[in-house]
Image (cartoon, helix red, strand yellow):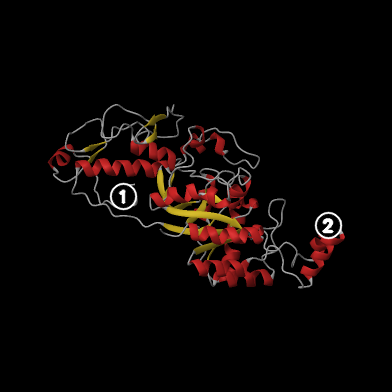
């Protein structure tokens, strides 16, 4: 928070005499409240061991919006560090909670949803307001400003709708079509007389070039199953497409539903992508954004994956960890910071489409989230899927890529 978010260099001391003697700007995190320091009176959370179900009382605050771990003294009216730690570590997801149909943490169980701050990166707001107070107390302080950046991520769960499915799956598809129109379309696509509906790759390459946008493609390379229905990773035509896209953008693995609680399968899928691209694969996003703490991130680290893009809700746009900067994952069960970097996504096209009927355009629905990230010079990450790019979505995607550019 101090170094990465605010750009401040600092050193830590537990020696009271050294602290008192120091004449430069200083932050005090203790029960003592020296007048010449920026004081944060601590809650017990950063000193406790193990995982506890703290009683949280969330209060509205005119400057800091919503606060908890409140206190009546100090430069800020709550334990800023403890509260931020609670949100960033996803403390609530280690506690008993209600899950959705895929056994994921339900966004409605989150403190952010219940107290209506899911749509803002609250920790960034806290830091911004604290920065103002710090400058009032220490006008000589110099903060290093961050740069806003946007990253488009594309999940490829099913590379083609009809092409290259193999004899058995194609025959099953023909039998299920039940209309001459659908059968005719399928046959034209199989015979290369019509473009497959999911084949949007040339469009995406051109769109990213045109708008100078960075992108990551996440490929599902799992074994076929009820929730994993992509083409076989041994299909040379699929491999050729992966290599083609890797020439233009970054690529990452999309660990299948079948990797949940299966480290061996996770390593196999990461290895498959590495063998196809001849590149070291370090980036991942869970299929269905399956995150279970601490197991998912522990497995990613053991599989050699050090940057994950699964932090977000697939059924609600917003800020799952209340933060729009990348940060290192802290494992609560072993009380240690890890080498895995969390990159949070805030917008998915599925959520935009789900709310389009509320008399707002897709651009109008996306705009508030985009503005929140720009406000704090954060990292804005969106999720699109290759199977949604019909004519209307292609038009919106180009509008969206222009919307998210730097001002």
**Other-residue count near label 1 (Cα within 10 Å), few / some / many at <14 / 14–19 / ≥20:** some
Residue 268 seen anywhere in this rendered image of the structure: no
In this picture, is 119 found above or below 273?
A: above
Mark 2 vs mark 1: which is more N-terminal?
1
Q: Which residue is mark 1?
A: 6
Q: Position of residue 197 (x, y in %)?
A: 70, 63
In this picture, is 274 found above or below 40?
A: below
Badge 2 marks a residue whose secondary structure is: helix
Label of residue 367 in the image = none
Residue appearing at x 26%, y 28% in the figure: 73
Q: Which residue is mark 2?
A: 177
In this picture, is 181 found above or below 115?
A: below
Q: Would you say the residues marked 2 and 1 are in contact, meaning their CB atoms lie under 8 Å apart? A: no
Q: Position of residue 62 (x, y in %)?
A: 35, 33
**Other-residue count near label 2 (Cα within 10 Å), few / some / many at <14 / 14–19 / ≥20:** few
Q: Is residue 25 left or right of residue 194?
A: left
Residue appearing at x 60%, y 68% in the figure: 203
Q: Position of residue 368 (x, y in %)?
A: 48, 47
Residue 130 seen anywhere in this rendered image of the structure: yes
Count of labels shown?
2
Q: Residue 49 falls in which quadrant of the image?
A: top left
């Amino acid at each position: 928070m101090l170094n990465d978010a605010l750009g401040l260099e600092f050193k830590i001391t537990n020696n009271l005499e050294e602290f008192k003697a120091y004449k430069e700007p200083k932050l005090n995190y203790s029960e003592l409240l020296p007048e010449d320091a920026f004081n944060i009176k601590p809650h017990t959370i950063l000193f406790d061991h193990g995982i506890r179900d703290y009683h949280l009382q969330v209060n509205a605050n005119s400057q800091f919006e919503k606060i908890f771990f409140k206190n009546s003294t100090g430069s800020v009216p709550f334990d800023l560090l403890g509260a931020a730690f609670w949100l960033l570590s996803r403390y609530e997801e280690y506690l008993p909670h209600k899950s959705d149909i895929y056994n994921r943490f339900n966004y409605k169980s989150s403190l952010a949803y219940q107290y209506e701050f899911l749509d803002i990166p609250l920790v960034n707001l806290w830091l911004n307001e604290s920065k103002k107070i710090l400058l009032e107390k220490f006008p000589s302080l110099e903060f290093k400003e961050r740069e806003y950046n946007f990253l488009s991520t594309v999940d490829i769960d099913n590379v083609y709708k009809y092409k290259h499915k193999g004899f058995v799956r194609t025959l099953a598809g023909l039998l299920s079509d039940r209309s001459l129109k659908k059968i005719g379309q399928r046959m034209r696509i199989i015979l290369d007389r019509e473009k497959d509906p999911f084949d949007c790759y040339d469009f995406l390459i051109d769109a990213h070039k045109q708008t100078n946008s960075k992108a990551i493609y996440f490929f599902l390379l799992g074994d076929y199953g009820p929730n994993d229905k992509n083409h076989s990773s041994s299909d040379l035509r699929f491999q050729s497409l992966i290599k083609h896209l890797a020439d233009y953008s970054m690529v990452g693995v999309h660990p299948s539903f079948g990797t949940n609680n299966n480290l061996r399968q996770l390593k196999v899928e990461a290895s498959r992508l590495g063998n196809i691209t001849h590149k070291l694969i370090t980036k991942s996003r869970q299929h269905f954004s399956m995150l279970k703490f601490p197991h998912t991130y522990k497995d990613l680290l053991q599989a050699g994956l050090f940057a994950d893009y699964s932090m977000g809700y697939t059924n609600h746009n917003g800020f799952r960890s209340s933060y729009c900067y990348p940060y290192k994952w802290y494992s609560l069960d072993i009380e240690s910071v890890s080498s895995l970097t969390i990159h949070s996504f805030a917008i998915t096209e599925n959520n935009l489409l789900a709310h389009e009927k509320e008399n707002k355009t897709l651009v109008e629905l996306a705009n508030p989230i985009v503005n929140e990230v720009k406000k704090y010079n954060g990292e804005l990450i969106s999720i699109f899927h290759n199977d949604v790019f019909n004519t209307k979505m292609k038009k919106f995607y180009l509008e969206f890529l222009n919307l998210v550019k730097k001002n």
